[in-house]
Image (spheres, rainbow, N blue to C red):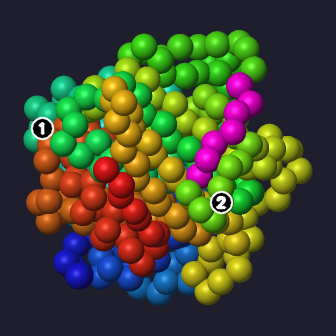
């Protein structure tokens, strides 16, 4: 599967970035690790001898240009993406290469769509934000479930996480998002974003077996409320989170993920249940696997590989479901997650 092509990875020494570097190497692509911490880059190079590490800062455009020189694409793994996405997209546009990120921040993804859609399209290049567990996977599942439907009344994405040990990056991104919203929460309803001050609704969601019916928090909005409406005519997009995982995320003393296998994955398991409804009809797509951070790596790397090999449906800024063949993409990740489609 190797192409001999090089992919710059900004934030390569971070939790998700390390998974991305390993996945690129597994696929025969050459990572160009980058980021602002030169010491951490050197430590990464010790673990992966022969890699060309390139320190860079989002505050220094020239350093970003040096980091991307000769690269065929870039994957941005460094949050908060409110600070890193725009400078990296700008650098990718200057270099004339595709950009992919793993942003879960709703506002950062909205910024990418609004700020760069025209410029990326005019340049004939590809910018794929939120190409990760949150945003990318949900969008692919909803798109796969839609099938030949051109519209639907509503889309629901329920996250059945066994628990959630957040990384430092996740906590920092959450802080930035709360600040940008003035502490409010957000949902997507009636075809638009709504910011609210009330509490999240406590609900039940019936997941496929063996998970079954679980307590969830409704309107626990993730990047899916950006990616799905960006290309699908669905006026109501709702996401849900199992209560146990939401409690872990909210608790300040929940530890970071701990590796339990040779790939560095944690023991966390997930089941993502995407349901679309139109009139009285319902369609469903389900994915399950281990470790939401680890699975973001094959999602992002598969996206880059497809862009570099010309298997895309759009140019400009586009979500996963808009630019890729969603069922085919999900089936290609069979080594990392299981996927079932019911129409």
| Residue at the spot of label 1 | 123
Q: Residue shown at 34%/36% (left/top)?
A: 281
Residue 91 seen from this side: no
Relative horizontal placement of residue 180, taking residue 215 as reference (left or right): left
Q: Residue shown at 71%/12% (left/top)?
A: 197
Magenta segment range? 200-207
Q: In this orientation, which residue lies closer to the viewer: 22 or 223?
A: 223
The image shows residue 108 at horizontal and vertical percentages of 47, 32
Mark found first going from the N terminus, 2 or 1: 1
The image shows residue 137 at horizontal and vertical percentages of 43, 52
Give the distance between the C-alpha atoms of the residues marked 2 and 1, in whole angstroms.
Answer: 46 Å
Can you tell which quarter of the image residue 72 is in? bottom left
Determine crowd level at label 2: few under 14, some 14-19, many 20+ residues with C-alpha closer than 10 A.
few
Q: Please, is residue 141 above or below residue 238 in the view?
A: below
For numbered disc 2, what is the local secondary structure? loop
Relative horizontal placement of residue 207, taking residue 277 as reference (left or right): right
Q: Please, is residue 27 above or below residue 312 in the view?
A: below
Relative horizontal placement of residue 254, taking residue 239 as reference (left or right): right
| Residue at the spot of label 2 | 211
Residue 211 seen from this side: yes
The image shows residue 138 at horizontal and vertical percentages of 44, 47
The image shows residue 150 at horizontal and vertical percentages of 20, 32
Q: Please, is residue 74 above or below residue 181 in the view?
A: below
Q: In this orientation, which residue lies closer to the viewer: 178 or 136?
A: 136
For numbered disc 1, what is the local secondary structure? helix
């Amino acid at each position: 599967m190797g192409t001999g092509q090089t992919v710059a990875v900004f934030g390569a020494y971070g939790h998700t970035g390390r998974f991305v570097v390993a996945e690129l190497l597994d696929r025969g692509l050459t990572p160009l690790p980058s980021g602002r911490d030169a010491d951490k880059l050197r430590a990464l190079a010790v673990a992966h001898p022969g890699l060309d590490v390139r320190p860079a800062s989002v505050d220094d455009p020239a350093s970003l240009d040096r980091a991307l020189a000769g690269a065929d694409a870039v994957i941005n793994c460094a949050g908060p993406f409110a600070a890193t996405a725009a400078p990296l997209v700008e650098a990718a546009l200057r270099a004339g290469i595709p950009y992919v990120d793993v942003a879960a921040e709703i506002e950062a993804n909205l910024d990418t769509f609004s700020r760069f859609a025209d410029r990326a399209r005019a340049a004939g290049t590809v910018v794929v934000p939120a190409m990760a567990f949150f945003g990318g996977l949900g969008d692919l599942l909803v798109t796969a479930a839609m099938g030949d439907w051109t519209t639907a009344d509503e889309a629901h994405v329920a996250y059945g996480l066994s628990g959630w040990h957040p990384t430092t990056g996740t906590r920092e991104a959450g802080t930035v998002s709360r600040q940008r919203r003035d502490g409010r929460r957000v949902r997507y309803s009636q075809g638009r974003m709504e910011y609210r001050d009330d509490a999240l609704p406590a609900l039940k969601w019936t997941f496929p077996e063996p998970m079954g019916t679980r307590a969830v928090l409704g309107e626990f909005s993730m990047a899916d409320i950006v990616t799905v409406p960006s290309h699908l005519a669905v006026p109501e997009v709702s996401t849900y989170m199992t209560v146990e995982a939401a409690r872990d995320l909210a608790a300040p003393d929940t530890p970071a993920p701990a590796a339990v296998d040779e790939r560095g994955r944690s023991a966390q398991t997930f089941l993502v249940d995407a349901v679309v409804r139109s009139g009285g009809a319902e369609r469903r797509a389900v994915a399950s696997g281990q470790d939401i951070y680890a699975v973001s790596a094959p999602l992002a790397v598969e996206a880059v590989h497809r862009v570099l090999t010309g298997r895309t449906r759009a140019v400009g800024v586009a979500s996963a479901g808009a630019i890729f063949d969603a069922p085919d993409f999900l089936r290609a990740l069979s080594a990392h997650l299981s996927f079932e489609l019911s129409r």
